[in-house]
């Protein structure tokens, strides 16, 4: 079908989340048709280098035959088996066991979801159940970070600390609270690592004191804040927040929806600092975007408290038709095999210096105020003035103009609202592809200067 016709249909019927609806109607959709490795092809035959792994998820690259085979074979054998009640399927059971093997040692039980938002949602509900089980029903308040993103479900969105996800929705979120993001580039505590970590720990302590420790259930955070602009906290921050939660007697829930599955180097970002969360949410790289799936992992202690409270007869009333979907589970098993035995994680680590260097070299560009990354997730923050770190006037629509210019140069990444350009190349990137990425990115920045 012609792009023109598809765009007309799209304008009439398809809602595109997180766009300005009128702006989208004017611009029209970019229609993607196929992909291979790190490359996409649009409906008009243009080849595009994907520097964002779709939406931080296609960590394996596109068109991997063995994943397609795993899905096809499972679809032929058994396309659906409920995870509800006492039914199960081999791929779902094996995937749960494999995830536990790979995850931090504190996590032993897995609840499968369709993506990240409902994994966060499930975490909130199970935590509430857990504290009721412990006879501490007042512990129902949750703390997260400003600029954090934890999805768009009606409860999980409350933890999301980005104003656009709340404006005009106006849903109650009185038990959800935020503390300042560590944000090294713009932290009032300065750019010293120790001071940034101390400020976050103190902010958490202050918030818990304000709410009363008897009322606080958990602290949620991403090891690197992705959708908030790829905010990379100093090494040691995650561990310090984990320890603070322990001493404050609140649960530590880590959201590795973006950072999981090799995105920052190790399988999970928690690994790098030997952090043992009480709960962890994952999605995206779990199935590399080939099929929707997320998961909530929890400690044995949380699981057992819930089980004991329900007793021998009462069902724990949380579930979804597509929980533990066998096709997604079969995909997940193959994707995990590719990360480990297939060498993808190792390739990601080996290629990371090309990514880090490319971003750092762009610090000398007149538009770039900050370049930050860990593993294969990074960002450039554009400023109107490097000394004062003054932001560009939003009326200039700089991120939109940059995305459009990049597209014309055959490059796709994500431009965030306030002049931040985000990158999350696939773990299969080659040195030549990194060379092309930065060549095209520099040309794009020069064009909009
Ligand atoms: N948590 C984090 C850290 C995310 O980045 C996202 C999505 O980008 C979510 C949760 C929500 O996941 P999903 O879009 O699969 O619902």
Image (spheres, rainbow, N blue to C red):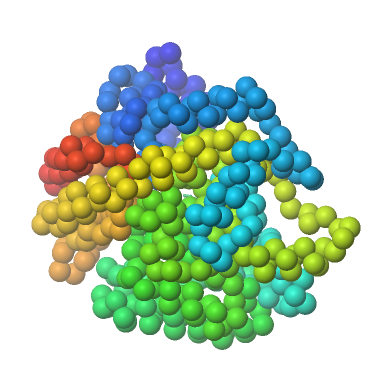
Looking at this view, name the residue that lies furthest to the front.
341
Q: Quadrant of residue 378?
A: bottom left
15 left or right of 83? left
Image point (43%, 69%), residue name: 274
Q: How far from the left and from the top, in percent, is residue 30?
A: 37, 29
Image point (49%, 80%), residue name: 244
Q: How far from the left and from the top, in percent, is residue 81?
A: 71, 34
Q: How far from the left and from the top, in percent, is residue 368?
A: 18, 56
Is residue 163 visible to the viewer in this orientation of the structure? no
Q: How far from the left and from the top, in percent, is residue 224?
A: 39, 61
Q: Quadrant of residue 93?
A: top right
Looking at this view, name the residue that lies furthest to the right.
313
Image point (87%, 60%), residue name: 312
Q: Is the residue 255 above or below the residue 57 in the image?
A: below
Q: Observer-nearest residue: 171 or 382?
A: 382
Image point (75%, 44%), residue name: 84
């Amino acid at each position: 079908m012609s792009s023109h016709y598809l765009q007309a249909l799209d304008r009439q019927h398809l809602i595109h989340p997180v766009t300005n609806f009128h702006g989208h109607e004017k611009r029209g959709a970019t229609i993607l048709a196929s992909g291979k490795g790190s490359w996409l092809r649009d409906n008009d035959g243009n080849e595009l280098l994907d520097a964002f792994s779709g939406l931080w998820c296609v960590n394996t690259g596109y068109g991997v035959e063995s994943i397609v085979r795993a899905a096809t074979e499972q679809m032929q054998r058994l396309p659906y088996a409920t995870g509800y009640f006492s039914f199960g399927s081999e791929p779902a059971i094996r995937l749960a066991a494999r995830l536990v093997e790979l995850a931090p040692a504190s996590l032993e039980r897995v609840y499968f979801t369709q993506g990240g938002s409902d994994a966060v949602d499930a975490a909130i509900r199970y935590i509430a159940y857990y504290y009721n089980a412990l006879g501490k029903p007042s512990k129902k308040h949750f703390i997260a970070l400003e600029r954090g993103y934890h999805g768009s479900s009606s409860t999980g969105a409350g933890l999301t600390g980005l104003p656009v996800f709340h404006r005009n929705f106006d849903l109650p979120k009185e038990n959800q609270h935020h503390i300042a993001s560590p944000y090294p580039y713009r932290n009032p505590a300065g750019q010293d690592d120790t001071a940034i970590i101390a400020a976050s720990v103190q902010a958490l302590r202050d918030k818990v004191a304000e709410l009363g420790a008897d009322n606080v259930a958990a602290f949620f955070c991403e090891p690197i804040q992705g959708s908030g602009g790829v905010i990379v906290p100093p090494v040691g921050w995650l561990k310090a927040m984990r320890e603070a939660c322990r001493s404050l007697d609140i649960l530590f829930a880590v959201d590795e929806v973006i950072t999981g599955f090799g995105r920052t180097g190790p399988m999970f970002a928690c690994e790098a600092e030997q952090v043992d969360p009480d709960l962890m949410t994952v999605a995206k790289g779990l199935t590399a975007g080939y099929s929707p799936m997320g998961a909530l992992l929890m400690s044995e202690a949380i699981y057992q408290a819930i089980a004991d409270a329900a007793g021998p007869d009462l069902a724990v009333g949380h579930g979804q038709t597509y929980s533990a979907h066998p096709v997604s589970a079969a995909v997940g098993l193959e994707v995990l095999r590719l990360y480990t035995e297939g060498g993808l994680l190792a390739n990601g680590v080996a290629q990371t210096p090309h990514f880090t260097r490319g971003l750092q070299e762009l610090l000398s560009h007149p538009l770039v105020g900050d370049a930050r990354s860990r593993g294969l997730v990074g960002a450039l923050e554009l400023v109107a003035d490097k000394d004062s770190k003054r932001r560009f006037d939003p009326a200039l629509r700089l991120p939109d103009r940059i995305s459009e210019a990049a597209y014309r140069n055959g490059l796709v990444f994500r431009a965030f609202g306030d002049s931040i350009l985000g990158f999350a190349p696939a773990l299969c990137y080659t040195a030549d592809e990194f060379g092309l990425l930065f060549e095209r990115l520099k040309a794009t920045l020069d064009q909009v200067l």
